[in-house]
Amino acid sequence: MGQPLPAVTLPKRVTDREVYLAVAAASGPETDVLAGIVRHVLLLRPNLAAARLRELSTTVATAIAQHRPDPARDLSPDDAFRMSRILVAVVPHLTTTPLREAATGYTREFLRSFRQGAGQRRQVQPLDLQFDRVPNVRRLCRQIWAGLYDTAVARPAVAAGIDTGPLGAALGIGTGDAAAVAVTKVDLPVLRTLVEQHIQPNGALSMPAGGVQSTLGAISGSVSGVRDQYTTTLIEINVSIGKAEDKKTPENLSALDKAIKKAEELDKQLKDAADGSKEALGVLAAVADLVDAEFGNDIREFATISVGMLTAAQKAARASAQVGKFIQGIASASSCELFLGGGIGFAFVMTALMIQATGLFGGRSKPIEQVILEELRKLAELVAELRDEMRVRFDRIDARLDRMYSGLLARLAEIDFNLGQVEGNVEELQASLYQLHTELTRLTADFQAQLDAAHRRDLVEGINGFLNFQERTGQPIDNETFLEAENLFFTWGNDHARDPLQAGPEERPFTDDDLLTELTRFSTATNINYLRLAPAERFGLAPLASGRLANPLDWIVAAEAYAQLSEESPALAAPISDNRVAALIEIGAALGTALSRIADPQLFDTLHDHYRTRYDDLRRAISDAEAQFRIAPRHQLHNITLFGGAEQGPPDEHFFNSDRETWVELGRCGGGRFDDKVAKLSTAAITDLNLTPLRPYLIADNLSNSSLPGVASGLRKLSACIAASWRLISSEEPGLGNIVRLTYELSMHVNINYGTEVVYRYTADTRERFIASVPKSELGSFDPTTGPRGKNPYPLLVGDKKLWSKLTTFPRRQAIVNPALRAATVTTVAAKLRLAQRAFYNQVAERLGQAGDPIGRFGRRLTGAKLLWQQLVVAGFPLSVQANEILRGLVLGGNALLAGSDAEAEDALLDDVRDLYAFFGTRREDPPAANISAELRTLALGRATQLKTLLDGIVAAGNPPEPPQVFAPTLLRLSLL
């Protein structure tokens, strides 16, 4: 798509300027902030002498060095957000003229760049929801550096002040350096190569026909090559992490160690390989601008996207190595910065870059150049590939990550990379991508829903009607309308944001039975005062604040609207009492201070103990349910344990001790009577029957009547009967023809049958004798019981002899008859007990969903304990939850604290007791041999302890409180009014 650009030459003046801007673009957020303030100093004082400019620049640089957030502890997801935090920390210390005015002007310009081009409602959102506006911030940085450079070229005093001051020192080049000289002073190899290959003796930079496209292809190919290597490493190390997390076997840990070392070695080789690529593409874009401005702009946007993807893959691979070290026990999870750019940061960047990429397809006058389109297609394929490889890790961090990624892929499917167009509206596509990402910012995730609420209608109408008034109407806002708007926004920030409708009712219950209901009744932002009071009302600790707090979102929106209104009409705002702004600042500062008190090890200890107690309560309720399950008549377990196997001690009730007549009195085996009067004999005399070998049969006999699904089928009933037989004692030939004299003694047997098979025999050997003379020819076939010369033994058991009643006087023996059948029965009974286990697990899962059931009630209490901890962590550690994937996983992901059941809609994550019991009750594989109760307790309390330890570590690390940083940009904006 598109013809090769003709030969083109960038004049020396422009070449030098573009190389200077390229070097400046790589300088870092601290230098960008310094440049911004210095630029505004020059706008206020254009005729400053070099010495004075250098002095003021040094003052600002010193303040930045002294007050900036520690880079090693800063959790900013992007340099643009770090710049905002630098300004928050530094601007209050710039109090002298003209630095105060310059810092104010630059801060407003900087914050405005986050909102430039956004709809009005978007403009008053919290800064962390403006992630998709970061390209605007980068454009502002370029404009500022361009302004500085152009001023320096025009005025030697400015050039001297910049070049000999901290800006010159930070860049390593001067405003007067030629491009060929500048690239030798900095470590940007790709930029240096571009310049050295195409610079002319006169300092101009020339490209032959088609040279722009070929150079673009070469640089983008180099970037994608490095990116692909990092991506491969990322995939490999995540596979190793997944295996090691599932099973910490020596083999898996060894494989993980190898993957980490391989990743670190690759990083050493590649970390500088693409340095200067983005900057080189910026210079190339300037060349393209001379003949095709749209192509030049495409190159700049593409440079950000392509190099951004490389950086994201690089950071993700490094963060994955740190996650691996954490699993190995080498790295501490409290070092949040170790995980920046990991699973959460990677998803953050992917969404932002894809929003920027889709922007290339809108409002075009001609098709996108093929080389860019092809690279965009590869990037989309890479996004899809990484989603498949990182799905498990995303689920462990936060299920919303995978849902967001799925939505991202669905939106990318709307792009036709062959035709270079979007199937639908580009703005709608970008809006949907933006909405996907806002779900990850947990504290502010429901922002749009809150603004859409009916009771905020007047606030929304005020935002739409009063802000950007002149731009919208073509005339300035009048004083009366301004005062109406000022009062509306002030009232919302000062009063409504703290009222019961916006910040939750005051009188609310805090019992364990109420926690779940109350914590899910409103959003976290609206629940702010419930969280404020929870430590005191539930645990007897100090509240987070003594007075009511404002809904954080309502306060931010109202305060941002108030600041924007005042900035747009400073003359009308001037007479307004300073007390109004001070009141808004006090409310916002109170929010940050109160939520910072969540970072309290004593509170963590209390939450941990509370969660453990609630878990043990639920475990006892489940244990009680198991006891009832074991004795339920329809189950026919008769109090055997579900996990004892087929050889466990006999059931409380079984074939031999029940009231069933099948054992109390026994008839003859095969039927018939013992004599004319007696049909059955009592078993009362059998007191020494050994039940141990019969245990599997006792259980099987009971379970054959069970109503549990699938348990009764295939099992048989026990039965018993009495048999009598003659046992041969001796055989002799008296010498009278062919006669043999056989001597027998009577044995009495109790045959125990499983189904139709005799499985056990109890025998008493009497001394009652019978002698038969048998022809030798009949010796092998003679039956002493039924033969013509035989004798019926059964009457001897009763009648005059009454041998049965004398059973205990005879030698007795007992034994298994059919070992193979017993072994098969053991296997079958074990399988049936596993079915019973499944039935019990499913019953527990079902009861956990029933609020009125004791198990359901204790499950709700556990879920409430989890949600309380979860919401306090989200409110007290908003930056760590965004940056530290270990912490996020413990709070929001698949490795989170176990709830009783899902508090929100049912999901597929095994992050609650109900889901785990249902999983083991329904999965294809057999349940574990042991009761899962003990293992689940170890899992649940292990996660709780890990969360507490991690939070303790974050606090002990001495990182600055996180909640104030959420409100700081708005507070700074207010303080500058």
Image: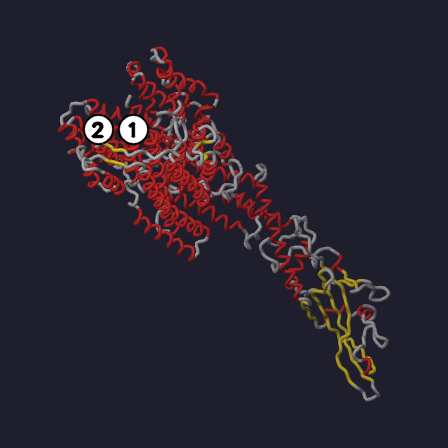
Q: Is residue 61 above or below residue 720?
A: above
Identity, as a three-letter code, of the amino acid under mark 1: Leu
Q: Is residue 723 above or below residue 496?
A: below
Identity, as a three-letter code, of the amino acid under mark 2: Leu
Where does residue 601 sit, x and y in percent of width and height? 37, 41
Where does residue 655 sit, x and y in percent of width and height? 70, 58
Closest to the observer, 518 or 278: 278
Q: Crowdedness of circle 2 by 10 Å Cα count: few (<14), some, many (20+)?
A: many
User: For residue 174, what is the image quadrant?
Assistant: top left
Closest to the observer, 259 or 380: 380
User: For residue 316, what is the image quadrant?
Assistant: top left
Examine the rendering and report whether any part of residue 538 can be seen: no
Tag of residue 658 = none
Side of 704 where 68 appears, left or right: left
Closest to the observer, 789 or 907: 907
The residue that disc 1 covers is 140
Image quarter hosting the N terminus: top left
Q: Secondary structure at mark 1?
A: helix
User: For residue 959, what is the image quadrant?
Assistant: top left
Q: Secondary structure at mark 2?
A: helix
Q: Crowdedness of circle 1 by 10 Å Cα count: few (<14), some, many (20+)?
A: some
Image quarter hosting the C terminus: top left
Examine the rendering and report whether any part of residue 849 can be seen: yes
Tag of residue 148 = 2
Where does residue 330 sit, x and y in percent of width and height? 35, 51
Where does residue 161 sit, x and y in percent of width and height? 15, 30
Kindly indicate whether the residue at mark 1 contacts the one at mark 2 (C-beta within 8 angstroms): no
Q: Earlier in the sequence, mark 2 or mark 1?
A: 1
Label 2 and label 1: CA atoms lie apart by 12 Å
